[in-house]
Image (tube, helix red, strand yellow):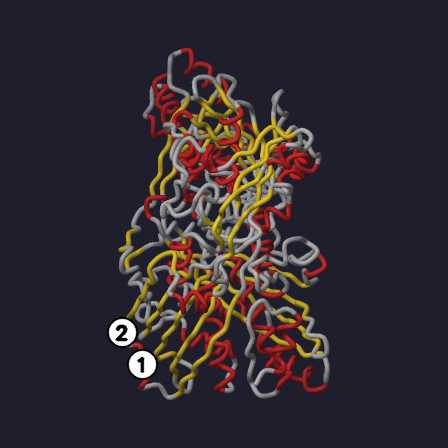
């Protein structure tokens, strides 16, 4: 595997911290098994364990719950149902449409009706299966097409227009119509959903939660218990993966465990096993598309009508902003002059689908990329030429369909560079020759771009706070509102603070995310963790730095602006002092050695009713060139080569950024090739374990996997000139989808590649035979 060569892991004495490939702050502890997760926390004496009682019916009237057999099981202490909720029986989500426990109806297979609480987790799980449910089955809506027929929606439809799509289609030289579907995706975090709730004094609660959003867990728990927020403290040191699946849905576990702890007056832990996690929690939203597109002889789109049907499951959760972001990214890298996009947020009797890396962006991007691939094959042109013909311009054709100017456009030079470095044209010729003499195995090639908007689409979440404490020995403690899920956020924040104070990276420690330290923090999501929390921590450190500079200026008789903090020293024109000595002297002179910092993203605004404005602070760009091979007898496919050129601005930590790019790409590859979610005719999820749901393995990663950075800092004033890197690389894997379709079209010989995603072996075979 080849990657851009990051600098070697920096030694202890190296400065500055930013720009160097520092090891993840927990790496050594993690490989030694010494980094504790929620389930590793020592249990307080008297801790009980909860397990969920699940609905076996997709839609029905809940007429009764018989708990007698469960209560007779060994170790069982109690059963918790909706009647035991002291506060609101509905979760404190923005749509207020999801009951904590099922009330009079059940709305999907796996909906939680209540809990069994026992001395051990296995006793609780076994007893939960003994609860007898009296449910009168009702008709279930299981697909978006059924939802459209029944006009079943969790939120009203949204339509965004620019120009006149009908007129653009009418004047087009060519038109195409079609439809296809893209499946959902299970988060498959290594650490499953878990919460541990401990009663404290005077109606206070401590919640350990594996969550991307401690503030929301705090709000949900207090709402369910009928308490003010300040009586609930939520802490998270680290997660074993999140990917969006712990943005809202981790809050369910915290609420359920808290209700049980409140009823039994003791600590309660709740950890889902993998099967229950699959059955209970939402996935990436599956989408279905209908389109009519008009274009000229060069493939330039002159009119587009696109309908997106989002399968939201039984409640809204985050479906509104997910579907909005899909609308925002339906252009991807391309100017659409006359376009109409209709987004329907369909209510079905399945799990309530939720955030997942990309947050609707991938479902928008794949729509336009699929259309452009179809256009190219229809015209007999190279797909890269058609894509380049439709790219956003610099001085014209540079405003999105939601009225945001694309001011930092590097698409054309970035694609041209990757075209050259990946030898795209030569490989295209070689693949054509290879396919001509290979009757069974066929290769495909695709080069696709990404333009991904960075900021929460809900503007109010684009804020962050942090605390920086300098202790009298010169060591530094940082706390911020973001959460660590393996992505390296705490490492980057420590690097930023180290450079702001001019101290070695090893002198900075980031503590657990905690609602008692930084309140009202936004979720660690939308790829904005470092942008928001890193900047807030930088501002907090800057306040302490300024205090120290002013103090030294007074000692040395110079202006504070002449004082520099770097290399573990504080220097003025007259003297150089050790940072630790300055800190001790400052404390003795009653100088404040801690501070808070606050940051709010500038420039952003948009109208939620019309979905127009500037929802994003900037765009992150990238492109991937992928080569695949398919077996026309079996439908199997394999990725052979990947070349990536990605825009991370000036990287704070090159090694971490490369890891995010590689991991995001492979996860996206899984979404589009092997990770298939299947619900049966009764609404039961059939793929609910690793035996039936296949994520990529190390063996699926190609030997040729090359990642390079685009060499330019962020043009907006972002921390260290960096750009977000968590989500944008995921969509680079759409090049895999397009390469598979290219191979299918080559095998058929007629330029047709009609398929749904993921491109499983069965779907590839179906595509080879489709008419």
Determine the image quadrant of residue 338.
bottom left
Q: Answer whether residue 332 is visible to the viewer in this image.
A: no
x and y, in percent, of residue 58 in the image: 52, 56
Given the current orientation, which residue lies at the most extreme top position?
588
x and y, in percent, of residue 521 in the image: 40, 37
The circle drawn on residue 168 is 1
Query: With 43 as the anchor, is 412 left or right in this view?
Result: left
Q: Residue at x 54, y 71 (%)?
A: 447
x and y, in percent, of residue 620 in the image: 44, 57
Q: Nearer the viewer, residue 373 or 267?
A: 267
x and y, in percent, of residue 566 in the image: 48, 31
- Element class at badge 1: helix
Q: Nearer the viewer, residue 37 or 725?
A: 37
Q: Earlier in the sequence, mark 2 or mark 1?
A: 2
Q: Badge 2 is on which residue?
A: 163
Note whether 357 is above or below 128 in the view shown: below
- Element class at badge 2: loop
The quarter of the picture where the N terminus appears is bottom right
Circle 1 packing at 10 Å, graded few (<14), some (14-19), many (20+), is many
State if disc 1 and disc 2 touch (CB < 8 Å). Answer: yes
The quarter of the picture where the C terminus appears is bottom right
Determine the image quadrant of residue 560.
top left
Q: Nearer the viewer, residue 219 or 292?
A: 219
């Amino acid at each position: 595997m080849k990657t851009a060569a990051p600098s070697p892991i920096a030694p202890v004495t190296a400065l500055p911290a930013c720009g160097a490939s520092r090891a993840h702050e927990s790496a050594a502890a993690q490989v030694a098994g010494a980094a504790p997760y929620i389930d590793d926390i020592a249990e307080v004496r008297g801790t009980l364990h909860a397990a969920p009682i699940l609905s076996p019916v997709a839609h029905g009237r809940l007429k009764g719950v018989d708990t007698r057999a469960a209560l007779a099981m060994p170790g069982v202490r109690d059963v918790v149902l909706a009647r035991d909720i002291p506060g609101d029986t509905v979760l404190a989500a923005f749509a207020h449409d999801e009951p904590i426990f099922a009330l009079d109806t059940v709305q999907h297979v796996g909906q939680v009706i209540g809990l069994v609480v026992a001395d051990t987790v296995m006793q609780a799980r076994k007893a939960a299966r003994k609860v007898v449910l009296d449910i009168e089955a009702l008709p279930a809506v299981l697909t978006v097409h059924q939802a459209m027929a029944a006009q079943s929606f969790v939120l009203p439809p949204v339509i965004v227009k620019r120009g006149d799509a009908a007129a653009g289609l009418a004047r087009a030289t060519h038109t195409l119509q079609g439809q296809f579907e893209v499946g959902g995706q299970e988060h498959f975090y290594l650490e499953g959903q878990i919460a541990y709730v401990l009663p404290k004094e005077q109606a206070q609660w401590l919640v350990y939660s594996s969550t991307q959003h401690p503030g929301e867990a705090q709000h949900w728990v207090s709402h369910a218990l009928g308490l003010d927020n300040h009586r609930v403290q939520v802490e998270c040191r680290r997660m074993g993966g999140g990917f969006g699946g712990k943005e809202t849905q981790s809050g369910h576990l915290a609420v359920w465990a808290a209700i049980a702890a409140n009823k039994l007056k003791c600590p309660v832990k709740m950890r889902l096993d993998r099967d229950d996690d699959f059955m209970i929690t939402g996935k990436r939203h599956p989408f279905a598309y209908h389109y009519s597109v008009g274009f000229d002889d060069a493939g330039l789109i002159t009119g587009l009508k696109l309908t997106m049907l989002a399968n939201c499951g039984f409640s809204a959760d985050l479906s509104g902003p997910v579907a909005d972001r899909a609308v925002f990214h339906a252009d991807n890298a391309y100017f659409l002059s006359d376009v109409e996009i209709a987004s329907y947020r369909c209510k079905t009797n399945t799990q309530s689908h939720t955030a997942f890396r990309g947050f609707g962006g991938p479902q928008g991007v794949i729509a336009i990329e699929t259309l452009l691939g179809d256009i190219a094959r229809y015209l007999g042109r190279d797909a890269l030429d058609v894509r380049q013909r439709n790219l956003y311009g610099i001085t014209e054709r540079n405003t999105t369909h939601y009225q945001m100017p694309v001011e930092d456009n590097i698409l054309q030079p970035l694609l041209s560079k990757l075209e050259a470095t990946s030898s795209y044209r030569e490989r295209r010729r070689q693949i054509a020759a290879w396919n001509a003499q290979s009757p069974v195995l066929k290769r495909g090639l695709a080069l696709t771009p990404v333009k991904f908007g960075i900021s929460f689409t809900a503007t109010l979440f684009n804020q962050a706070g942090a605390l920086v404490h300098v202790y009298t020995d010169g060591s530094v403690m940082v706390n911020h509102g973001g959460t660590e899920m393996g992505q390296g956020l705490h490492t980057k924040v420590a690097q930023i603070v180290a450079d702001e104070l001019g101290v070695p990276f090893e002198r900075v420690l980031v503590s657990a995310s905690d609602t008692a330290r930084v309140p009202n923090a936004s979720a660690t999501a939308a790829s904005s963790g470092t942008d928001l929390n890193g900047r807030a921590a930088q501002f907090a450190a800057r306040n302490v730095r300024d205090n120290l500079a002013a103090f030294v200026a007074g000692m040395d008789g110079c202006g504070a602006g002449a004082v520099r903090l770097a290399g573990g020293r504080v220097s003025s024109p007259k003297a150089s002092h050790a940072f630790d000595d300055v800190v001790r002297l400052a404390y003795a002179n009653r100088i404040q050695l801690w501070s808070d910092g606050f940051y709010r993203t500038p420039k952003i605004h948009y109208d939620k009713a019309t979905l127009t404005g500037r929802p994003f602070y900037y765009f992150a760009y990238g492109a991937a060139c992928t080569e695949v091979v398919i077996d026309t007898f079996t439908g199997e496919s394999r990725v052979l080569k990947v070349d990536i050129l990605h825009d991370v601005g000036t990287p704070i930590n090159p090694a971490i950024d490369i890891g995010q790019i590689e991991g995001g790409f492979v996860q996206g590859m899984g979404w589009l090739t092997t990770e298939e979610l299947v619900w049966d005719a009764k609404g039961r999820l059939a793929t609910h374990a690793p035996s039936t749901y296949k994520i990529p393995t190390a063996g699926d990663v190609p030997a040729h996997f090359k990642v390079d950075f685009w060499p330019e800092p962020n043009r907006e004033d972002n921390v260290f000139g960096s750009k977000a890197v968590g989500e944008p690389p995921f969509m680079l894997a759409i090049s895999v989808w397009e390469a598979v379709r290219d191979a299918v079209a080559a095998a058929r010989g007629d330029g047709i590649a009609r398929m749904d995603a993921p491109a499983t072996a069965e779907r590839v075979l179906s595509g080879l035979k489709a008419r």
